[in-house]
Amino acid sequence: FSPTDVTVLFVLGGPGAGKGTQCARLVRDYHFTHLSAGDLLRAEQDRPGSQYGQLIRDCIKDGAIVPMEVTVALLENAMRETITTSKNKKFLIDGFPRKMDQALKFEEVVCPAKLVLFYDCPEAEMEKRLLERGKTSGRADDNADSIRKRFRTFVETSMPVVDHYESEDRVVKVDATSTPDGVYADTQTKLKKVLG
Ligand code: UP5
Ligand code: MG
């Protein structure tokens, strides 16, 4: 596909900041296709015959970043499939890029992102949300030990990506502490200002 007629928004934020929750609302109202890198990795992990299953399982449990070749390929395939089957070319890429090498690679080989939506949330609030979700989510990383590791990776590895985009003036930052609908209202206001 041609990078020039594809629109990509990166949706970033710490673990449990509400990226998926907000993406669902944006999909409902603006006809984006939502691609969560974490969801794609979990699906690949469970795909019979995948050569990356164990690697992905280990990384997710440790809150570590899966090597970018795997994630970029999954995203690129999903985009290609969406464009072929539904003709939709507007994508929310959720939870990616979370390491500088991924950011540079994706924008080089797939396409540049139009902007970066960043959900800003204090750790204490994110931890509360994840522990609550962990009671029923079945996610291997919704436990105190994995959450601590996810937070560390976020601060050390993923925030520099946000700072990089911030320095290029490409970040729309939204406070993610209020209710889901409150955060969404703020998202809409800020996106409107930037995208019109
Ligand atoms: N909730 C949401 N919004 C709320 C609000 N405003 N008020 C109160 N509660 C709110 O929300 C989390 C929980 O909070 C839910 O129960 C929700 O109802 C509630 P959600 O919308 O799911 O938040 P989200 O930010 O999407 O949290 P998630 O857990 O998905 O974030 P992560 O970034 O940790 O997870 P992800 O799936 O993206 O990645 C998982 C792992 O995959 C990574 O740790 C890493 O190991 C691996 N990975 C890579 O290696 N490479 C990648 O590129 C991507 C992932
Ligand atoms: Mg998510």
Image (cartoon, rainbow, N blue to C red):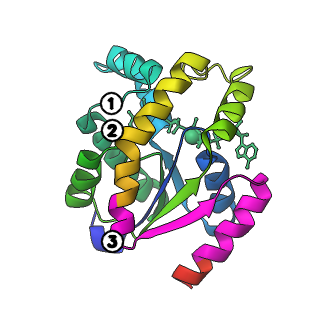
Vertically, is 62 above or below 175?
above
Question: Which residue is at 66% across, 30% downward?
Answer: 130
Q: Is mark 2 within 8 Å of ligand 1?
A: yes
Disc nearest the viewer among 1 and 3? 3
Residue holding disc 3: 168
State which image quarter holds ligand 1.
top right
- Image quarter where the N terminus lies is bottom left
Q: Is residue 96 left or right of residue 187?
A: left
Disc nearest the viewer among 2 and 1? 1
Q: Position of residue 191 (x, y in %)?
A: 58, 74
Helix, strand or loop at label 3? It is loop
Vertically, is 194 above or below 7?
below
Vertically, is 68 above or below 82?
above
Residue holding disc 2: 71
Question: Which residue is at 48% across, 30% downward?
Answer: 150
Q: Nearer the viewer, residue 32 or 49?
A: 32
Q: Is mark 1 within 8 Å of ligand 1?
A: yes
Q: Is residue 101 magenta?
A: no
Q: Are marks 2 and 1 in contact (CB under 8 Å)?
A: yes
- Image quarter where the C terminus lies is bottom right
Asked whether residue 14 appears in the rendered view, the answer is: yes
Mark 1 packing: few (<14 Cα in 10 Å), some, or many (20+)? some
